[in-house]
Image: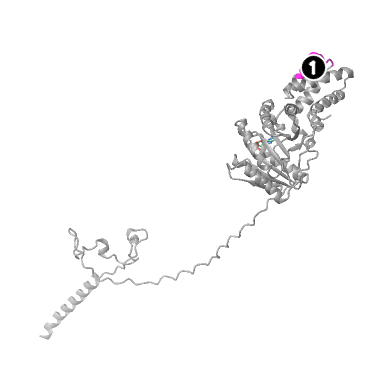
């Protein structure tokens, strides 16, 4: 009987071993891998990497706890072994970066104060800028006058040359008449003689006895006030800046008033000019009252103890009445402090005879005491200086010979004529 049981026991034991083997083989061994970064699973909120997604996340149960209609009930999951947690290597401690240095507040850069060129002899230094006019006067006229026979035709040509150089008809007639007479009396005519004669007549036409000094300096304890007027684009603001340099170069102290409130950039332009020579500038709001700016500028000049206040005006020439109103008001308001010492009219030499009619309007509405003739470097018609003085009866005090800061020269008739005629 015992022997009969042995095979049964063996078979049962084998069956048990086989069953155990099957059981063990069917147990899930797969560790739950963390979702790949970038997969939907990884992006799902609330699911930790490596955690199994609970079915409720895939299809949340109905409030009654039932599975939604049409969906299979989720099969019960067998208990899953937690994957062995391999401790991740401790992250390297972050390298400490030095905190960025706090920004160092920039030192306000004081504009470099320039030393303007001395004014004496500027016209001589800048004589080459009159190259275009030198062709007409030096080469052209002297060439004509040195002809063997100075007949009527030759004199007509001399006359035409002077007129084409903008000297003006009346002044030309007078100059030619005198030259004719003197060459006739002189008889022999060397090139040097002729140059001398022409120089004398041109200088005479420029009236060398006129007072061309600027009215600057303290008067009765107050600064002189110079108004600068003229049509748009003539070079008013630029000339104001250059005049400030002329004054500083000659030892004056200056306040600039930006009463051209019509053009916003004009005040900035003037402020730049002022800062370059260490002068103060008074400005107002764009479109503000020019007279108020002029008043404040003079007040500033008095308080600061400077000797000259220079005021740039807009001087728009829409019509004579408007211009008169604007300049008249500025003058009246400034005169609450003291008289206006000088009114300088800025004229563009390249506008030639056409500029003269505009210039006349200014002389009618303001008491113009001097002319600043700009852009003489840009014309072959240097004779305009003679025409301007003759037509307006006002001395040319300064001439502009370029866009550089010191390209404004005090006018001197003899130096000017010598430059026009070129090297001897
Ligand atoms: N070549 C040359 N250019 C000059 C001279 N004077 C002024 N200019 C130029 O002329 C231009 C006009 O000058 P501004 O000073 O702005 O003229 P403005 O009369 O004040 O003009 P508004 O403010 O519009 O009335 C600028 O480009 C200057 O550089 C000069 O003597 N020679």
Report the residue at 14% width, 82% height from top.
6
Q: What is the residue that sits farthest to the bottom in this orientation? A: 2
Say above or below: 306 vs 148. Answer: below
Instruction: Tell me, yes or no, if residue 405 can be seen here.
Output: no
Instruction: Tell me, yes or no, if residue 304 can be seen here.
Output: yes
Q: Closer to the camera, 300 or 238?
A: 300
Magenta-span inclusion, residue 180: no
Q: Residues within 10 Å of mark 1 (few under 14, many from 20)?
A: some
Left or right relative to 41: residue 290: right
**Which segment did they paint magenta?**
148-159
Secondary structure type for disc 1: helix
Magenta-span inclusion, residue 152: yes
Report the residue at 27% width, 70% height from top.
80
Which residue is disc 1 drawn over? 155
Image-quadrant location for residue 407: top right
Image-quadrant location for residue 385: top right
Report the residue at 84% width, 25% height from top.
195
């Amino acid at each position: 009987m015992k022997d009969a049981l042995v095979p049964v026991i063996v078979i049962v034991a084998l069956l048990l071993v086989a069953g155990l083997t099957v059981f063990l083989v069917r147990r899930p061994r797969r560790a739950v891998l963390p979702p790949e970064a970038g997969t939907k699973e990884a992006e799902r909120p609330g699911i930790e990497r490596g955690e199994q997604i609970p079915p409720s996340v895939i299809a949340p149960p109905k409030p009654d706890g039932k599975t939604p209609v049409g969906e299979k009930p989720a099969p019960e999951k067998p208990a899953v072994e937690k994957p062995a947690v391999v401790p991740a290597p401790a992250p390297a401690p972050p390298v400490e970066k030095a905190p960025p240095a706090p920004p160092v507040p920039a030192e306000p850069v004081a504009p470099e104060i320039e030393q303007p060129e001395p004014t004496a002899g500027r016209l001589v230094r800048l004589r080459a800028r009159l190259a275009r006019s030198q062709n007409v006067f030096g080469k052209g006229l002297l060439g004509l006058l040195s002809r063997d026979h100075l007949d009527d035709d030759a004199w007509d040509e001399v006359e035409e040359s002077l007129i084409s150089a903008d000297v003006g008809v009346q002044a030309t007639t007078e100059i030619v008449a005198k030259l004719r007479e003197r060459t006739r009396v002189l008889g022999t005519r060397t090139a040097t003689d002729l140059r001398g004669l022409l120089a004398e007549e041109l200088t005479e036409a420029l009236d060398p006895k006129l007072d061309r000094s600027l009215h600057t300096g303290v008067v009765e304890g107050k600064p002189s006030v110079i108004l600068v007027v003229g049509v748009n684009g003539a070079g008013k603001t630029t000339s104001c800046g250059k005049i400030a340099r002329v004054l500083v170069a000659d030892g004056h102290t200056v306040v600039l008033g930006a009463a051209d409130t019509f053009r916003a950039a004009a005040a900035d332009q003037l402020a730049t000019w002022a800062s370059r020579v260490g002068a103060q500038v008074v400005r107002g709001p764009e479109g503000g009252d020019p007279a108020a700016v002029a008043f404040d500028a003079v007040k500033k000049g008095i308080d600061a103890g400077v000797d000259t206040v220079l005021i740039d005006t807009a001087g728009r020439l829409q019509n004579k009445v408007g211009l008169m109103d604007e300049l008249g008001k500025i003058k009246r308001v400034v005169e609450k402090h003291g008289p206006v010492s000088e009114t300088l009219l800025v004229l563009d030499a390249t506008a030639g005879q056409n500029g003269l009619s505009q210039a006349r309007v200014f002389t009618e509405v303001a008491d113009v005491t001097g002319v600043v003739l700009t852009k003489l470097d840009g014309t072959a018609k240097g004779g305009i200086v003679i025409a301007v003085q003759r037509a307006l009866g006002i001395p040319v005090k300064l001439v502009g010979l370029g866009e550089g800061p010191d390209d404004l020269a005090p006018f001197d008739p003899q130096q000017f004529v010598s430059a026009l005629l070129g090297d001897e």
